[in-house]
Image (cartoon, grey):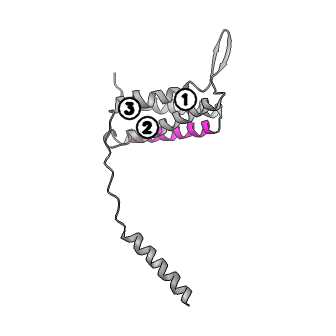
Amino acid sequence: MHKLLSIAAALAALLTVGCAQEEAPATQYRGIADVHQTMIWILEPAADVIWDSAGFIITVEGEQDLTPTTVEGWLKVVNAAAVVAETGNLLMMPSRAAGDDWLEYAGGLVEAGTVALEAAQKQDGKALFDAGGQIYQVCLACHSQYIKP
């Protein structure tokens, strides 16, 4: 019986400590780059790494496989894919979000970047190529709605 009371007392103490902790104050986000700068400085270079690391270039001289062949090459793609995915989150920040469609496109960028990240981690050139196409489609859909000539 004494053990049972000790366990109950310990659980009660843990619950009391957990409940007594105050919630952390809400983080105040402060965007440094505007949307255009976010695209040019952050998203575009990362997407270019993915696009330049997947598929083939076919010329008169022959076929060139763009798939990375070294650990360092794949790590560069892993990093770029993570940047693409996280940029989708950056685009959802209140100071950048431009409506429900915008949030859907930004979420699509997170998803496509995550697919690219998984492909790069598995060193799967075909899956990376497909993920690059998915990234392109998200960008194209967003641009067709938000970039007006």
For marks 1 and 3, the one nearer the N-term is 3
Name the residue: 38% across, 38% down: 91
Q: CA distance from mark 2 to mark 3?
A: 8 Å
For marks 2 and 3, the one nearer the N-term is 3
| Secondary structure that dominates the magenta span | helix
Q: CA distance from mark 1 to mark 3?
A: 17 Å
In the image, residue 129 lies at what x, y percent?
A: 60, 30
The part of the image, by quadrant, that contains residue 34 is top left
Q: Residues within 10 Å of mark 2 (few under 14, many from 20)?
A: many
Q: Amino acid at mark 2?
A: Thr
Q: In the image, which residues are magenta? A: 101-121
Q: CA distance from mark 2 to mark 1?
A: 14 Å
Q: Amino acid at mark 1?
A: Ile
Q: Amino acid at mark 3?
A: Thr
Left or right: where does residue 34 sit relative to residue 125? left
Most distant residue in the bottom direction: 1
Q: Are marks 2 and 3 in contact (CB under 8 Å)?
A: yes
Q: Could one spot residue 143 in this view of the protein?
A: no
Closer-to-camera residue (80/62): 80
In the image, residue 64 lies at what x, y percent?
A: 66, 18
Query: For the C terminus, which image quadrant?
Result: top left
Query: For the N terminus, which image quadrant?
Result: bottom right
Instruction: State the count of labels.
Output: 3
